[in-house]
């Protein structure tokens, strides 16, 4: 069953073709276990779970099997190889064999009983496709209770009000999804709601979609996994702080509640970082907080990370640069502030950076122009419509005179891959 590995050919139909030289590519494996045969190639998709791979119980010298990380998720959910009674690199099958690098491809060849299976190629593809950067942004809804929106062009200029679509509300959340679209969700009209409104790649807000999950307000949302989004935390009708989350598919469908992880709180914020991950941070858990919770590329929320920087709520956050994020502004329990905290591409929050612009809370922020961000609106003692641009190095600029209806507890998200 031996044979060289030829190019893997993916037909336009999505069907994996057989490769030349005797290696046959099989259907994508999504199960948690699979038994494989020599002479085959297996794309292993571990988006939802780890996968234990059982090798043949007998093999001939020269037999070959290939495994590839179909969805670039082995770093989150690894593969485990059970050599099924045969040796693997001279060790018997009581040894653990795992591969846990995103984008990895493993080609193994059987050498005979003494050494057994040998990985003759064990590489990861670092040059993975990178999504085009988000170019535009949209601010929407807010208090005084409204449904107006304001589009932001790729130069960071906020446009005048667009007549609102959907239920007027405030204290909602918003995030990008699907690569070039956005979603507003949840909030309060005087009573909490779970309705959502999708935003097209041209910035057009759609009518209300019936809510899914626990109705709540003062929650946060961010993009993750390159084309999906997550809503999390908030304050429900009990009333009580919550920590549950709701994932959003790349077609904008909100899933049911996922049990919360970390400290329940509200008036927090969230942003994407590291290209495919997200971070929730700050908020009010009965007092101002600076806790953060990282979100993996598969939408799993991690436990609390001790806070860095000034504890506060009513904060805003956005991605900037290629894979970084920034938290900014808020209320520290006694006064409004304007300091910011930068987030590295590994999700580490840095100490306070002296604030620029008018101190305020209840504002919103979004990525724009590919690698920049914008903070806008909020309450500085009265509601305002000013904005502050953030350059690709995370430096916040001075106030820009506001455009559109002054409001607080509005939200914003990036959309559109076209400038």
Image: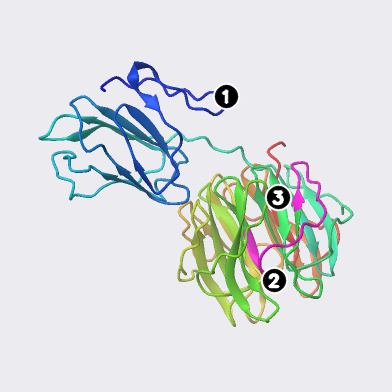
Q: Quadrant of the N terminus?
A: top left
In magenta segment, residue 106: no
Which residue is drawn at the image coordinates 27% and 39% (left, top)? 55
Mark 2 / mark 1, whichever is N-terminal: 1
Camera sees residue 399: no
Q: CA distance from mark 3 to mark 2?
A: 19 Å
Tell me which label, 3 or 1, sits earlier in the chain: 1
Disc 1 is placed on an element classified as: loop
Q: Secondary structure at mark 3?
A: strand
Quick one: 178 or 30, which is closer to the camera?
A: 30
Describe the element under mark 2 as helix, strand or loop. Answer: loop
The segment highlighted magenta reads 198-221
Image spot of residue 367 (x, y percent): 65, 50
Mark before the other along the chain sequence, 3 or 2: 3
**Residue ID for mark 1:** 12
Residue at left 53%, top 72%?
A: 290
From the image, state whether disc 3 or disc 1 is nearer to you: 1
Mark 2 → mark 1, Cα distance in angstroms? 43 Å
- Per the rendering, the mark at residue 216 is 2
């Amino acid at each position: 069953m031996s044979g060289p590995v030829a190019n893997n050919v993916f037909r336009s139909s999505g069907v994996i073709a057989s490769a030349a030289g005797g290696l046959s590519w099989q259907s994508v494996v999504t199960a948690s276990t699979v038994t494989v045969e020599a002479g085959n190639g297996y794309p292993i998709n571990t988006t939802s779970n780890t996968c234990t791979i059982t090798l043949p119980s007998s093999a001939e010298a020269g037999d070959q099997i290939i495994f590839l990380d179909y969805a670039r998720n082995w770093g989150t959910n690894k593969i485990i190889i059970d050599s099924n009674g045969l040796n693997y690199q001279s060790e018997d099958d009581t040894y653990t064999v795992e591969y846990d690098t995103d984008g990895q491809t493993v080609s193994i060849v059987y050498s005979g009983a003494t050494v057994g299976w040998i990985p003759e190629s064990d590489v990861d593809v670092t040059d993975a496709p990178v999504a085009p950067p988000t170019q535009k942004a949209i601010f929407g809804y807010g208090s005084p209770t409204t449904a107006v929106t304001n589009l932001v062009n790729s130069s960071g200029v906020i446009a005048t009000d667009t007549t609102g679509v959907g239920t007027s509300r405030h204290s909602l959340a918003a995030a990008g999804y699907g690569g070039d679209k956005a979603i507003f969700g949840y909030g309060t009209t005087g009573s909490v709601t779970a309705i959502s409104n999708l935003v097209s790649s041209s910035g057009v807000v759609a009518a209300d979609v019936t809510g899914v999950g626990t109705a709540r307000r003062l929650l946060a949302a961010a993009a993750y996994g390159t084309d999906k989004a997550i809503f999390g935390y908030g304050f429900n009708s009990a009333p009580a702080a919550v920590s549950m989350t709701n994932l959003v598919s790349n077609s904008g469908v909100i899933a049911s509640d996922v049990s919360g992880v970390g400290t329940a709180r509200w008036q927090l914020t969230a942003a994407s970082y590291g290209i495919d991950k997200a971070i929730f941070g700050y908020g009010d858990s009965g007092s101002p907080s600076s806790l953060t919770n990282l979100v993996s590329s598969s939408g799993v929320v991690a436990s609390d990370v001790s806070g860095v920087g000034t504890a506060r709520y009513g904060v805003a956050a956005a991605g900037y640069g290629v894979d970084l994020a920034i938290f900014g502004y808020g209320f520290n329990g006694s006064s409004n502030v304007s300091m910011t905290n930068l987030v590295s591409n590994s999700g580490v929050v840095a100490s306070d950076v002296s604030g620029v612009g008018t101190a305020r809370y209840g504002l919103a922020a979004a990525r724009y122009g590919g690698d920049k961000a914008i903070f806008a609106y909020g309450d500085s003692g009265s509601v305002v419509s000013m904005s502050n641009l953030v350059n690709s190095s995370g430096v916040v600029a001075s106030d820009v005179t506001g455009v559109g209806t002054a409001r607080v507890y509005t939200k914003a998200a990036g959309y559109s891959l076209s400038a």
